[in-house]
Image: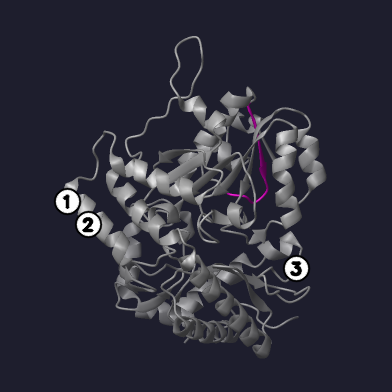
């Protein structure tokens, strides 16, 4: 029996729930496009640390971790206590409170470029406000962004896929081409240029080249364009100052989400005081940007954020997570080499899978085995199938495309994961579901 058939047979309750979900949710029965599995995925009941369990009683080593939000793992005691204690006091005051100030103090102490702080319900909202502020500050309207970089699903963030006239205001250019970047900025038409922290797709399936990303800020300043670094995914994974601090970048604006609130729903916009000052109310005829939002700086979210940031501030969590990432990458690649499979792992605390021809081996810094962007993005169907085979072997990944680590992962987890990875590829090749060996 093929592994996929075994998966269906061993997950009857998940299958039943999926059939019910199809009656409600248009995107193949799920509430997030990143949760689509073929034929269906496991429906989860609870999680703790580095483990997650489904309705059929299966236990998995967890490598989705809240789409990257749970760098502390599931149910970290300090975050759980903070949420519990604040829930008793109240979840939503619709008024100012001390927790929002304490949380902002912590963020500013961690991020050198954070002269001002603003809270939102999610990272996408923070990016949208960054665009609005940049337009008001510069008097320009156009947006410059890079291919494959994701900043949310709002119209101005997903062009050219979003229908409507909004696309006329947005230009999408290739990654890593400084000539094209400067040509566009030199037109003097752009209010803002956006870059995804780490690189395209969850911290760098397509990583930025250091020389390129370090040139973005000076070029943006030269031509009067605001530079926004989107750290919704990468924020605080590489260190207390985020990926920008790790790379010694000085963006005008930076957005955070996910980890900044310990897995609770939140977005944060930080940056220059003069740009953020556009939010300050002014008398007519002066213009300013109004910011409201029922869920801004909810006490229960702030409490979780304070607990999380206190744990992330000294860098010890990030050091441990990145050490586990290096362990997974290195031991995994050795096992793949020994098995003769043309799969590789790369990245730091978010480990991406690579399938295809190797131009060279993954280096100690975790860079991919090619500089060809098309090769990095290839193999999505094979990776999705691999994800199902990994589920069969007790590993819950981000659809086979990446493994997101947390501080809860142990060396034993890594050893089991590498063993499962080799077995999953072996089984998938045997079932003729994916290729495994070089052509």
Find residue 142 and report its image quarter: top right
Q: How many marks?
A: 3
3D distance between C-alphas at marks 3 and 1: 52 Å
Q: Is residue 154 visible?
A: no
Residue at the (55%, 44%) spot, across then down = 254
Residue at the (61%, 77%) spot, across then down = 434
> Is 65 in the magenta?
no
Residue at the (36%, 80%) spot, across then down = 10
Magenta-highlighted residues: 141-150
3D distance between C-alphas at marks 2 and 3: 47 Å
Contact between labelled residues 1 and 3, with CB atoms less than 8 Å apart: no
Instruction: Classify residue 385 as left or right of residue 22.
Output: right
Q: In the picture shown, does residue 112 fall above or below 331? A: above
Kindly report which numbered mark, 3 or 1, lies closer to the viewer in this rendering: 1
Residue 399 at x, y percent in the picture? 51, 67
Q: Residues within 10 Å of mark 2 (few under 14, many from 20)?
A: some
Residue at the (44%, 75%) spot, across then down = 409
Coloring scheme used: one colour
Residue under label 1, please give it.
88
Find residue 81 and report its image quarter: bottom left
Secondary structure at badge 1 equals: helix
Q: In the picture shown, does residue 104 fall above or below 307? A: above
Residue under label 3, please give it.
370
**The furthest residue to the top:** 285
Kindly report which numbered mark, 2 or 3, lies closer to the viewer in this rendering: 2
Residue under label 2, please give it.
84
Find residue 365 and report its image quarter: bottom right
Secondary structure at badge 2 equals: helix
Contact between labelled residues 3 and 2, with CB atoms less than 8 Å apart: no
3D distance between C-alphas at marks 1 and 2: 7 Å
Q: Residues within 10 Å of mark 3 (few under 14, many from 20)?
A: some
Contact between labelled residues 2 and 1, with CB atoms less than 8 Å apart: yes
């Amino acid at each position: 029996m093929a592994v996929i058939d075994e998966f269906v047979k061993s997950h009857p309750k998940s299958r039943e729930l999926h059939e019910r979900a199809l009656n409600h949710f248009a995107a193949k029965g799920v509430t997030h496009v990143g949760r689509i599995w073929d034929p269906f995925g496991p429906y989860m009941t609870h999680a703790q640390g580095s483990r997650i369990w489904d309705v059929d009683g299966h236990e998995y080593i967890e490598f989705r971790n809240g789409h990257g939000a749970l760098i502390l793992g599931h149910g970290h005691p300090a975050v759980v206590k903070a949420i519990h204690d604040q829930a008793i006091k109240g979840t939503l005051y619709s008024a100012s409170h001390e927790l929002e100030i304490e949380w902002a103090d912590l963020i500013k102490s961690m991020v050198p470029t954070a002269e001002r702080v603003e809270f939102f319900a999610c990272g996408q909202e923070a990016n949208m406000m960054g665009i609005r502020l940049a337009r008001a500050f510069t008097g320009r309207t156009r947006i410059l962004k890079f291919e494959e970089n994701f900043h949310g699903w709002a119209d101005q963030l997903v062009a050219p896929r979003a229908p409507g006239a909004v696309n006329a205001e947005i230009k999408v250019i290739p990654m890593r081409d400084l000539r094209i970047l400067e040509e566009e900025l030199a037109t003097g038409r752009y209010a803002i240029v956006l870059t995804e922290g780490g690189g395209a797709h969850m911290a760098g399936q397509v990583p930025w080249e250091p020389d390129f990303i370090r040139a973005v800020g000076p070029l943006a300043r030269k031509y009067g364009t605001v530079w926004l670094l989107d750290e919704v995914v990468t924020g605080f994974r590489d260190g207390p100052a985020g990926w920008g601090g790790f790379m010694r970048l000085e963006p005008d604006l930076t957005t955070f989400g996910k980890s900044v609130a310990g897995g609770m729903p939140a977005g944060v916009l930080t940056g220059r005081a003069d740009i953020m000052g556009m939010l300050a109310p002014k008398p007519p005829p002066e213009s300013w940007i109004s910011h409201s939002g029922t869920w801004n700086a909810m006490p229960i979210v702030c409490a979780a954020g304070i607990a999380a940031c206190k744990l992330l501030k000294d860098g010890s969590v990030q050091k441990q997570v990145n050490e586990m990432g290096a362990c997974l990458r290195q031991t995994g690649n050795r096992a793949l080499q020994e098995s003769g499979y043309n799969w590789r792992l790369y990245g730091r605390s978010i480990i991406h899978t690579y399938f295809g021809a190797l131009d060279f081996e993954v280096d100690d810094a975790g860079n991919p085995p090619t500089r060809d962007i098309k090769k990095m993005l290839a193999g999505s169907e094979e990776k999705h199938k691999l994800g199902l085979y990994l589920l069969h072997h007790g590993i819950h990944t981000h659809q086979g495309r990446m493994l997101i680590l947390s501080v809860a992962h142990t060396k034993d987890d890594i050893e089991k994961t590498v063993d499962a990875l080799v077995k999953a590829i072996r089984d998938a090749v045997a079932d003729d579901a994916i290729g495994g060996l070089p052509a």
